[in-house]
Image: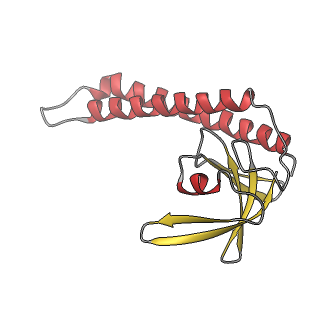
């Protein structure tokens, strides 16, 4: 998989997410400040709730903007089978026969996209699986604790 094209695909998706979030924040702000948001009685909290929503959406838009800036300035680096997994690693893993692709980045965890027929999820070193993968190499097994259970991930490839 071409990592440079993968990064470009994440940028396109994040730009679309940012536009949608900004529009949602604008609409929530209008709802919070518009004529219909004036309380009808002391128990009417529509305007207050809309203002909280607008604030949360504006914060999320700022977070997406930070992740976009990171992707735009990213130097794409290819890794070999003997290199340890680190930030900007694209890793194929397998658990119980199910293969997955994860892209380790400092920010943006949880964003997923389908690229070249493969679903790739952004993870961060702060996530359980990201923390378990950092420093490992192809052929190693990452043990990830999820609640009271431990799940093993075999590292199949690293780019």
Residue 85 vs residue 19, the one in the foreground? 85
Locate residue 74: give its quadrant: top right
- Measured from the top left, where is residue 79 in percent x and y? 83, 47
Q: Which residue is located at x 27 percent, y 35 percent?
A: 46
In the image: residue 110, left or right of residue 12 = left
In the image: residue 25, left or right of residue 125? left
Q: How is the image coloured?
A: secondary structure
Residue at far bottom of view: 96
Q: Count of labels shown?
A: 0
Q: Position of residue 43 (x, y in %)?
A: 14, 37
Q: Quadrant of residue 10?
A: top right
Find residue 68 and report its image quarter.
Answer: top right
Name the residue located 75 percent from the left edge and 57 percent from the top edge. 137
Q: Which residue is at the front of the view, 65 or 92? A: 92
Q: Please give left or right for residue 28 compared with residue 92 in the image.
A: left
Outermost residue on the left side: it is 42
Q: Compared to 36, does 109 lie above or below?
A: below
User: Residue, x 43% and y 67% (percent of image)?
Assistant: 147
Q: Is residue 102 left or right of residue 37?
A: right
Name the spot of residue 92 as percent of width and height, x first: 75, 60
Q: Position of residue 35 (x, y in %)?
A: 31, 23
Viewer-side residue, 156 vs 117: 156
Q: Above or below — where is 6 with respect to 153?
A: above
């Amino acid at each position: 998989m071409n990592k440079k094209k993968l990064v470009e695909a994440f940028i396109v998706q994040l730009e679309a997410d940012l536009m949608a979030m900004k529009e949602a924040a604008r609409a929530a702000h209008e709802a919070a400040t518009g004529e219909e948001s004036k309380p009808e009685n002391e128990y009417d909290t529509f305007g207050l709730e809309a203002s909280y929503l607008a604030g949360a959406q504006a914060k999320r838009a700022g977070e997406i903007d930070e992740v976009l800036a990171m992707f735009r300035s990213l130097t794409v680096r290819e890794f070999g089978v003997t290199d340890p997994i680190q930030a900007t690693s694209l890793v194929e893993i397998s658990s119980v026969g199910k293969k997955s692709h994860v892209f380790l980045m400092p920010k943006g965890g949880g964003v997923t996209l389908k690229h070249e027929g493969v679903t790739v999820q952004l993870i961060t070193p702060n996530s359980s699986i990201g923390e378990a993968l950092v420093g490992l190499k192809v052929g190693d097994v990452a043990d990830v604790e999820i609640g009271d259970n431990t799940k093993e991930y075999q590292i199949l490839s690293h780019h």
